[in-house]
Image (cartoon, rainbow, N blue to C red):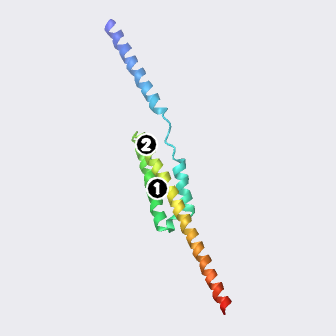
Amino acid sequence: MRHIFKTAIMMFAMAAATAAIAVGCASSPPLRTEASSSGIRAAEEVGAAKVPQASLHLQLAKEELENAKRLAANDEKERAVSMLSRAEVDAELAVALSREDAERAEAQAAVDRARQLRLENKQ
């Protein structure tokens, strides 16, 4: 009888420990992907896909976001967070490169208009 009681107590203790571990794992915060996702959307909205260098960084950001999700699913939180940071930076770079390209094109158009006006004034 004493042996059964000891076994029952050990089983209860093991069940309690397992439950505590499960609660600890379940309470870890979920991976926050909003910043990376919104950065990718912003890059797409400013036309990063049409600018070669920006397109490269946009694609990298998308791949890094997917890798981060996969790492988080495999319980590799630290690597997942690092990969998310990389995705955010690549998305921001894609936005910056897209804007730079648009500003360069606008500046070139202004120079072309100025040249055209000069030519018209000489005639």
Q: List the single residue furthest toward the bottom.
A: 123
State the SS at label 1. Answer: helix
Residue 79 versus residue 114 in the image, above or below: above
Q: What's the amino acid at mark 1?
A: Lys
Horizontal and vertical percent position of residue 66: 44, 51
Q: Residue at x 46, y 55 (%)?
A: 61
Image coords of residue 122 (percent x, y): 66, 91
> Where is 103 relative to 17, above or below?
below
Q: Is residue 37 above or below residue 17?
A: below
Foreground of the two, 17 or 94: 94
Distance from Cα at disc 1 to Cα at disc 2: 16 Å
Query: Residue at the left extreme?
Result: 3
- The residue lying at 56 percent from left, 58 percent from top is 42
Task: Check disc 1 and report the residue beneath it.
Answer: 62
Q: Which residue is mark 2?
A: 72
Residue drawn 49% across and 53% down? Answer: 89
Label 1 close to label 2 by CB (< 8 Å) = no
Residue 64 visible to the viewer: yes
Give the quadrant of the C terminus. bottom right
List x then y, in percent, for residue 72: 43, 42
In the picture, the quarter occupied by the N terminus is top left
Residue reaching furthest top?
A: 2
Classify mark 2: residues with Cα within 10 Å, few (<14), some (14-19) or many (20+). Answer: some
